[in-house]
Image: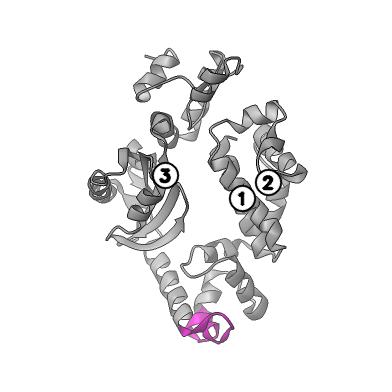
């Protein structure tokens, strides 16, 4: 697993712990751990290999062991066991605007709701509004979210996605804080149908860019909003995701977030064969013998530069 994958697992563990009603400090430790990893420029694989995870802020022995298992094994038994202990329907409920882990847990404990159909019934009967911390406005927001999700649950055609993607790209190009921007993911690969739109931006002001992205006039609701990434639902039901990186990492991130998982594996193997490490942050010497070079990595202006560095062009 690379840095982004590990951070994603830690974030999900935090959600799972909150769903189970665990100690908030324990939950916060995983959230903080994910944030630290997201801001790393050094691959976790190197830190694990050199036994340096303890250098990361807030990484106690337990978190070090879990991250090490994720990096070396590619999965984490603790995470899998946690996930298996949660009713599958709860994950669908978390996708509804207005519902977080605490509210999902409360709905289950008080009304014994385990899935969206049961939640819709409870909202339509007015039972949700009677719960402490909910009320009629929250109940209506939840019901609207369920109906919206059911209406736009299917994948979208490429021609529709291209039109929406073009509109967003044109808007992002006008933002003064943007150095480079591009489509990514299945939209850039031009898949016939797709579930969401992915975009990548390089900028020295990620917070400002994230704020502009989530405030676009076509945004129906904000699913998630962090320091360097955000997800929104657009008018019409399509989801759009944005990730902001440093400009020197842009070509590497673009290649990573565009290529399929299988393609990325092949590229990483190609790098290893040449004594290099490739990830979404850059291309680095695998032995780290030259500290300065290891920190900056191999300079590539674009994706073609990456291919040339790997003797593929």
Q: 87 above or below 32?
A: below
The answer to whether 231 appears left or right of 32 in the picture is left
Q: Residue at x 45, y 55 (%)?
A: 225
Report x, y in % for residue 167: 23, 50
Q: 198 above or below 267?
A: below
Q: Earlier in the sequence, mark 3 or mark 1?
A: 1
**Viewer-side residue, 186 vs 207:** 207
Residue wearing tag 2: 58
Report x, y in % for residue 175: 27, 47
Can residue 156 be seen here? yes
Total of numbered circles in the picture?
3
Q: Residue at x 49, y 62 (%)?
A: 95
Q: Is residue 49 magenta?
A: no
- Marks 1 and 2: CB-CB under 8 Å? yes
Can residue 85 be seen here? no
The answer to whether 119 appears left or right of 209 in the picture is right
Magenta part of the chain: 121-136
Q: SS at mark 1?
A: helix
Image quadrant in which you'd find residue 21? bottom right
Could you give the CA–CA distance between mark 1 and mark 2, rounded to whole angstroms? 8 Å
Using the image, tell me which numbered label, if any, was put on residue 243: 3
- Which quarter of the image is occupied by the C terminus? top left
- Which quarter of the image is occupied by the N terminus? top right
Report x, y in % for residue 310: 45, 16
Q: Nearer the viewer, mark 3 or mark 2?
A: 2
């Amino acid at each position: 697993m690379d840095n982004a994958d590990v951070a994603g697992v830690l974030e999900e563990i935090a959600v799972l712990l909150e769903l189970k009603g665990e100690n908030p400090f324990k939950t916060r430790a995983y959230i903080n751990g994910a944030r630290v990893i997201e801001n790393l420029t050094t691959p976790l694989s190197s830190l694990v290999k050199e036994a340096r995870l303890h250098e990361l802020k807030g990484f106690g022995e337990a978190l070090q062991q879990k991250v090490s298992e994720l990096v070396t094994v590619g999965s984490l038994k603790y995470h899998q066991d946690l996930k298996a202990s949660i009713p599958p329907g709860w994950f669908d409920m978390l996708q509804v605007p207005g519902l977080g882990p605490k509210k999902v847990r409360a709905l289950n404990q008080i009304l014994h709701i385990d899935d969206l159909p049961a939640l819709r019934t409870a909202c339509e009967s007015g039972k949700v509004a009677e719960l402490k911390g909910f009320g009629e406005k929250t109940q209506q927001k939840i019901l609207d979210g369920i109906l919206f999700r059911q209406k736009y649950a299917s994948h979208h055609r490429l021609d529709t996605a291209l039109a929406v993607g073009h509109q967003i790209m044109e808007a992002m190009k006008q933002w003064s804080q943007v150095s480079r921007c591009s489509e990514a993911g299945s939209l850039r690969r031009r898949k016939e149908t797709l579930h969401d739109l992915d975009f990548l931006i390089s900028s020295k002001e990620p917070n400002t860019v994230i704020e502009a992205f989530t405030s676009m006039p076509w945004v129906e609701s904000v699913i998630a909003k962090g320091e360097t990434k955000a997800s929104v639902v657009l008018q019409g039901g399509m989801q759009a995701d944005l990730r902001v990186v440093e400009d020197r990492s842009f070509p590497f991130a673009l290649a990573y977030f565009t290529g399929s998982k299988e393609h990325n594996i092949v590229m990483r193997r190609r790098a290893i064969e040449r004594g290099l490490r490739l990830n979404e942050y850059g291309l680095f010497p695998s032995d780290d013998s030259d500290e300065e070079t290891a920190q900056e990595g191999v300079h590539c202006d674009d994706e073609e530069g990456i291919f040339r560095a790997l003797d593929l062009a």
